[in-house]
């Protein structure tokens, strides 16, 4: 993915090519334009940092330091390149020790297996998060 994004990312609009051309003229612009410039540059530097880190660690196994909060939620402690980062950062990661998704059929249509949870996640991503678990699996 890194090679593809490095070669085609700007052309496809996945990453930004450069800082905003009006960056040095911000003092003469209105507030709306200043905000657009800052947002553009923030996104550019975010992409640049993610791609630089990905290139440094290309073809290496890396580990992410994480911590659990009091509610049991897992948080990654790294900036930029992490499995909890933006879409660009997540797309550049490939997990080394994968596992199979086993199908465990149950009589009521919902089972406690990995495939059901994957289907629920997919439904949540498409705005169906208010449906019951059974309807999200369907």
Image (cartoon, grey):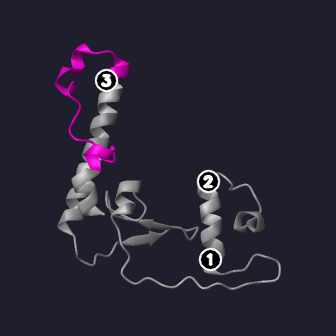
Query: Which range of residues does the magenta coloring cover?
Result: 9-33
Residue placed under numbered mark 3 in the picture: 34
Cα–Cα gap, marks 1 and 3: 47 Å
Say whether marks 1 and 3 touch (CB < 8 Å).
no
**On the picture, is 54 further left or further right than 74?**
left
Residue 122 pos. (x, y %): 60, 62
Q: Quadrant of residue 98?
A: bottom left
Residue 79 pos. (x, y %): 32, 58
Q: Quadrant of residue 132?
A: bottom right
Residue placed under numbered mark 2 in the picture: 126
Residue 124 visible? The answer is yes
Is disc 2 placed on a helix, strand or loop? Answer: loop
Q: Identify the residue at image location x=75%, y=58%.
A: 131
Is disc 3 placed on a helix, strand or loop? Answer: helix
**On the picture, is 56 further left or further right than 29?**
left
Q: Residue furthest right?
A: 108
Mark number, residue 115: 1
Q: Is residue 73 magenta?
A: no
Q: Identify the residue at image location x=60%, y=85%.
A: 102
Residue 101 pos. (x, y %): 56, 82
Residue 130 or residue 79, whichever sits in front: 130
């Amino acid at each position: 993915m890194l090679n593809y994004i490095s070669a085609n990312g700007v052309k496809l609009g996945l990453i930004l090519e450069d800082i905003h051309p009006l960056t040095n003229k911000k003092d003469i612009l209105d507030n709306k334009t200043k905000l657009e410039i800052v947002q553009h540059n923030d996104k550019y530097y975010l992409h640049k940092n993610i791609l630089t880190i990905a290139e440094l660690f290309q073809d290496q196994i890396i580990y992410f330091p994480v911590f659990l909060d009091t509610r049991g939620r897992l948080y990654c402690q790294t900036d930029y390149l992490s499995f909890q980062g933006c879409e660009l950062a997540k797309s550049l990661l490939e997990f080394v020790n994968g596992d199979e998704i086993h199908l465990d059929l149950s009589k009521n249509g919902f089972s406690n297996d990995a495939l059901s949870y994957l289907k629920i996640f997919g439904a949540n991503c498409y705005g169906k998060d208010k449906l019951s678990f059974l309807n999200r699996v369907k």
